[in-house]
Image (cartoon, helix red, strand yellow):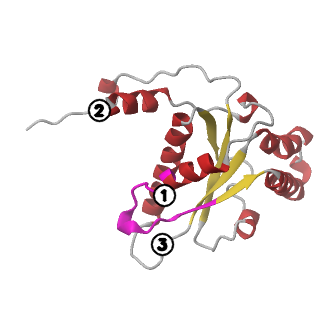
Amino acid sequence: MIATQLNELIRNRRSVFPKQFVPGKRVGKEIIDQILINATWAPNHGQTEPWQFTVFSGEGLKKFASFQSESYKQTSGENFVQDTYDKFRNTPLLASHIIAICMKRTTTKRIPEIEDIEAVACAVQNIYLSVSAYGLGGYWTSGGVTYKPEAKEFFGLGEEDKLLGFFYIGHVAVPSPSAKRSALEDKVTWING
């Protein structure tokens, strides 16, 4: 029975975008804590646990929105677009919580950087599945300030650390449509003996 439930959870998980959230409806901290605990049980080479999460909620959402929109305004120069600025300023306020997904580089062990990044991606998959299991909506974005140098200081990241995006969480008002996947035969090669 558990395998069947897991299969259903994985196959029915969908990205749910902030405009699909119930405006103003908050997710309880105890649920966010459980989602984050599940994230920390992701596989990671050498048990380095390279993830670092910064959670924005309540007034913190405004702080994040302000940082992201003002950073865009200061660095875009002649490429500034008011609609983009407004999106950075307003979209975070549609979420109940936003989790900044950071990778703290493992320096004490000789683990390739890509393996730390992969471990954080596994943690995000645990977040996705947990959000779905709680009947919530979520979306991992790598837009905005994700790859901008000015974000490192804001998130307390060192030179070798990385900001890998943001996970938006909210209650679902408008579900995402079903998805399809290619046939297994198109993606898998079996070698038997």
Q: Residue at x 64, y 52 (%)?
A: 165
Residue 72 highlighted magenta (yes or no) = no
Q: Earlier in the sequence, mark 3 or mark 2?
A: 3
Instruction: Determine contact: label 1, label 3, CB under 8 Å.
Output: no
User: What amino acid is at disc 2?
Assistant: Val
| Closer mark to the observer between disc 3 and disc 2 | 3
SS state under label 1:
loop
The mark closer to the camera, 1 or 3, is 1
Magenta residues, start to end = 38-53
Q: Amino acid at mark 3?
A: Thr
Mark 1 and mark 3: span between their CA atoms? 16 Å
Q: Identify the element where label 3 is drawn.
A: loop
Query: Which residue reaches farthest left?
Result: 193
Q: Which residue is mark 3?
A: 106
Q: Position of residue 141 (x, y in %)?
A: 65, 44
| Residue 39 lies in the magenta stretch | yes
Q: Which percent across, then down, holds residue 162?
A: 60, 63
Report the Cα–Cα distance between label 1 and label 2. 29 Å
- Residue tagged 1: 40
Provide the residue designation for mark 2. 188
Q: What is the total number of numbered labels drawn onto the structure image?
A: 3
